Amino acid sequence: MVMPYEELDSDTRCFTLVGQFLWHWAYLEASINDAIATALELGHPQRYIVTKNIQFRDKIKTLKASVAVASSLSDEERRMHKRTLNKISDYAAKRNIIAHDMFGPDDDTDSVMFLRTVASDRFELPVDLWSTDDFVAAFTDLDNFRDQVTALEESLKTANNFKRIAQALVGKETGIEALFSYDSMDAPDFPVEPNSDRDPDP
């Protein structure tokens, strides 16, 4: 159902759009948490404890590393999943603006005005305007990301199942002991740049 934003007064429209963005982001992050739990084979309540205590950028790193060692994935599948994770990582900058910067309705348009502060290697006080259409497009992006992360989680479930079968066939230990018997059977031929947190898109 499409919300009739044009029928809302400027304050209500502003707060509705910002709230909806955060709702879509929360659902995306919940799907990321599910994928991490699957990748690391975390049960309840370990899944909630671990994901609650990991910053967002480290969640993305954890999933990228999990994709790299999932031996049942093809090279193309790895590239596809890592492209998705890189895009989500880049999108986090938009979430940070909405979550941390002052905002309010723009008096002249249907936009939300964000009063940003840039104070790292330079100092600026830029003003960003997000139109209603910008928000609606962002909602679609976030939902698409969530679908792609769900597909990634399914791939990791398959990878875990293949690993269990292989361990059973060759008599490998399972559980915590497996962490200390990592061998070439688990490691795919996947190039990773040294000292790089971000793998460039192909």
Image (cartoon, rainbow, N blue to C red):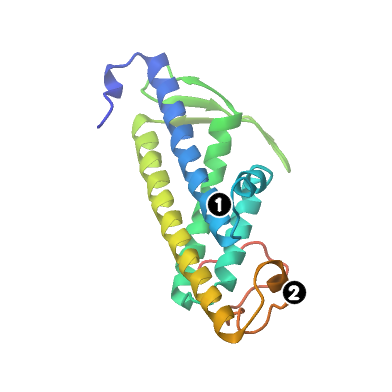
Q: Position of residue 173 (x, y in %)?
A: 67, 76
Q: Is residue 81 or residue 18 the one in the foreground? A: 81
Q: Amino acid at mark 2?
A: Phe
Q: Which mark is residue 89?
A: 1
Q: Classify mark 2: helix, strand or loop.
A: helix
Q: Residue at x 63, y 50 (%)?
A: 57
Q: Is residue 81 above or below residue 2?
A: below
Q: Residue at x 64, y 80 (%)?
A: 172
Q: Is residue 108 or residue 85 the one in the foreground? A: 85
Mark 1 Cα within 10 Å, few/some/many (few <14, many 20+)? some
Q: Residue at x 72, y 71 (%)?
A: 177
Q: Is residue 10 above or below residue 23?
A: above
Q: Is residue 29 above or below residue 36?
A: above
Q: Amino acid at mark 1?
A: Ser
The numbered mark, 1 or 2, whose residue comes first in the sequence reads 1
- Residue bearing the label numbered 2: 180
